[in-house]
Amino acid sequence: MTAPTPPALDVRNLSKHFPIRKGLLAREVATVRAVDGISFSIGEAETLGLVGESGCGKSTAGKLILRLIEPTTGEIRVSGTRIDGLNRRAMQPFRRQLQVVFQDPFSSLNPRMRALDLVAEPLRNFEVLDNAEIERRVAELFEKVGLRADQLTRYPHEFSGGQRQRLVIARALALKPKLIVCDEPVSALDVSVQAQVINLLIDLQKDFGLAYLFIAHDLAVVEHISHRVAVMYLGRIVEIADKDVLYASPQHPYTQALLSAVPVPDPTVTPQRLILQGDVPSPMRPPSGCHFHTRCPYAEARCRSERPAMRQVGPKQFAACHLREGPVAEGV
Ligand code: SF4
């Protein structure tokens, strides 16, 4: 019997706490719990959408996975190999496998480099190829992402926003990665261009078997691209489920509130809006027990003192809420 293929990415109990220091002696006076013990995995050729309000820790989670910042606790595995704690040299092969597409393509592209050199840069850094081979590979990538050969010699400012994001995607693909962290990749684009870039990402996933961690706040975009969706609130994942299940029958009160705010494009349907009271509390002083208890319309006494465990509440659905029953889930 052959061993099951490990997931492209597996994250266990990952946390990032930032100390706040003050005074001459830089004494630690508080801690920001940006990410507070999250666990999930992403299979090959799978997209996991990570959603939540701004400041919920989703972008910090992406940076931790890319090892742009170091975790406070937790484990990160790429195709079964643990990468947290690896030194720079040992991390090198995994840098190829993990790529990123950020929100603002302008800031991720050197304005003084031509498109050809921007896409060729990772190939020159990581592979031993002659110039002719590099140019052939870049031309191939340009075609894959829908850019034209005559644009190879242009500079970033000569492209439109959507074309610049295509350029960033071509650069991310150059080293044939396994996983791309897409951090709000279409938020800065016009709506019509957003759909083109999302469809491009879907096509590339089919062609190359890519796994995506798709971080976004736009629930409609996440629904379009994701296979599964994880919902974050104040540094924790509160619900994770197959996309269709989550959008049809959210189980966590926070997910219900988020989804009830999405406009329904059917005039015959009267939306049942669940309006949340108050603002998102500061991650410097997160509420005790269930972080959501200060805004939850169903909160009860134990919600203020006990952190709810992640439970399997349906065949492909997990939620962390005291009101939901099911076996405690280890891996999701
Ligand atoms: Fe609301 Fe309590 Fe469930 Fe938290 S655990 S979501 S406060 S009912």
Image (tube, rainbow, N blue to C red):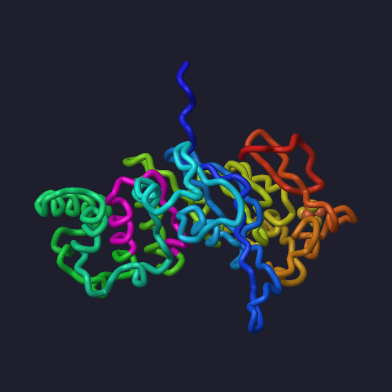
Magenta segment boundaries in residue numbering: 165-186
Q: Residue at 50% across / 57% down in the picture? A: 62
Q: Residue furthest front?
A: 25
Residue 296 in the image, given as x and y percentages of width and height: 79, 60
Left or right relative to 53: residue 214: left
Residue 198 in the image, given as x and y percentages of width and height: 40, 54
Residue 118 in the image, given as x and y percentages of width and height: 24, 63
| Residue 45, placed above or below residue 175 | above
Q: Quadrant of residue 255?
A: bottom right
Q: Residue at 65% across / 59% down in the picture? A: 235
* Magenta residue check for 260: no
Q: Residue at 30% across / 45% down in the picture? A: 176
| Residue 114, placed above or below residue 306 | below
Pick the residue in front: 119 or 223: 119
Q: Quadrant of residue 243?
A: top right
Q: Residue at 21% across / 70% down in the picture? A: 113
Residue 116 in the image, given as x and y percentages of width and height: 18, 62
For ligand 1, which image quadrant applies?
Answer: bottom right
Left or right relative to 22: residue 77: left
| Residue 284, placed above or below residue 230 | below
